[in-house]
Image: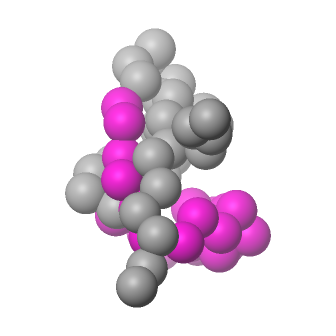
Amino acid sequence: MRLIEKVEVYTQDGNKVIAHIQNYDAEELNRRINEKNSITIRIGDVIVDPRNILKIVPVRES
């Protein structure tokens, strides 16, 4: 069973989007965001322009 995690995606234009992803991996997300030929990137159930991403923060539920 894969763990579904929630992340907050903050964009350069001031928006915040909640995405649900499987197995949060900061290094893998960073690699995908920084690929030169990417026009869009899928983060869980959200599709965004990688050039518009300011930061991605995992939401730790207690």
Estimate the x, y position of residue 15 in percent, counting from the top left: 39, 19
Rendered image quadrant of residue 39: bottom left
Residue segment shown in magenta: 17-42
Relative vertical location of residue 15 with respect to residue 4 in this rendering, above or below? above
Q: Residue at x 41, y 63 (%)?
A: 4
Q: Image check: 2 left or right of 25? A: left
> 37 or 4, which lies in front?
4
Q: Residue at x 36, y 46 (%)?
A: 19
Relative vertical location of residue 33 with respect to residue 11 in this rendering, above or below? below
Colouring mode (rainbow / by chain / secondary structure / one colour) = one colour
> 5 or 11, which lies in front?
5
Q: Quadrant of the N terminus?
A: bottom left
Estimate the x, y position of residue 24 in percent, counting from the top left: 58, 64
Q: Residue at x 48, y 37 (%)?
A: 9
- Name the residue at the bottom extreme: 1
Q: Is residue 30 magenta?
A: yes
Q: Is residue 44 magenta?
A: no
Estimate the x, y position of residue 45 in percent, counting from the top left: 25, 57
Q: Residue at x 57, y 37 (%)?
A: 61
Relative vertical location of residue 5 with respect to residue 1 in this rendering, above or below? above
Relative vertical location of residue 23 with respect to residue 44 in this rendering, above or below? below
Number of residue marks: 0
Q: Confirm whether residue 39 shows in the render.
A: no
